[in-house]
Structure formats: structure tokens, C-alpha cells
Image (cartoon, rainbow, N blue to C red):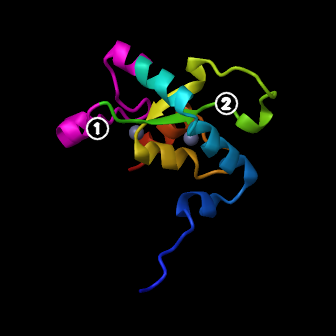
Amino acid sequence: MADLPTVEPYEGEEGGVIVRLHKRYERDPRLVADKRKAARLAGDFSCEVCGFDFKASYGDLGAGFFEVHHTQPVHMMKPGSKTKLNDLAQLCANCHRMAHRRRVPLTLEELRVALRGKS
Ligand SMILES: [Zn+2]
Ligand SMILES: [Zn+2]
């Protein structure tokens, strides 16, 4: 059996420690849970950049799904500093990956401009 690739292309491509820290941070289950709770209360799970709604496209499978993105540069945070809910964005998988195309993640506004800029 051929060896399956073990590298996560997403992180491997970007390479840097900053991105890895950022991604690890975003996997903090408590942060994700808080953000999901806020979305549930608001009744809105759509992407903050493009408006994509997983449930609208995938039905029940996509209900309540989005990815959590940290909008503050994690590497510049002081140890022990608290993340506010406002520092987290709910993004679709596409916009989230695009945010991490650069070593320093794009801002939501930069992503919106990039998306609109397509012709
Ligand atoms: Zn999106
Ligand atoms: Zn992110």
C-alpha cells in the first residue's frame, strides 16, 4: 500500500511558525464553542466575508457549520491575554483558507475586497 501523505498541505504550504500558532489557537475547543454559541443565539451561521451558508447549500449536514478564524495576530498577543468574541470571525472554508494565503492573515475587509475584485 502506498504511503499516504502525512503533511497537512494547508499548513505546509504556508510554513511559518506564526501560521501554525494561529491555526493551533483556532483549534482551542473553548473558543470555538463560545463562537458557536454566539452564532446560535444570533441565529446566523453565515460566512462574515461572503455570506455563504452551509445549511442553505448542504441541508442538515451543513447546519450550524462554520470555521472559526482569529482576526488578531496571535503571535503579537501577550501570554495569558484574553480573546474577545469580537476577535473571532465565522468564515466558510474557502474564505478561511484565503485568509491564510499570506503569512500574516488577510483582514476580513481585505478578503471582501479580493472577492469583489474578481471579474
Ligand atoms: Zn466565505
Ligand atoms: Zn484562521
Q: Most extreme residue toward the front, as rendered?
A: 1
Furthest residue toward top: 41
Label 1 beta carbon less than 8 Å to ligand 1: no
Is residue 55 visible from the viewing direction of this image? yes
Examine the rendering and report whether any part of residue 117 can be seen. no
Above/below status of 78 relative to 15: above
* Rendering quarter of residue 66: top left
The residue under the point 40% across, 40% down is 92
How many numbered circles does the render carry?
A: 2
Q: Do the residues labelled 2 and 1 touch (CB within 8 Å)?
A: no
Residue 50 counted in the magenta span:
yes
Tag 2's secondary structure?
A: loop
The span picked out in magenta is 38-63
Question: Is 4 left, or right, of 58 in this rendering?
Answer: right
Q: Mark 1 points at which residue?
A: 54
Residue most toward the bottom? Answer: 1
- Does 85 sit left or right of 61 as displayed? right
State the image quarter where residue 57 is shown: top left
Residue highlighted by disc 2: 72
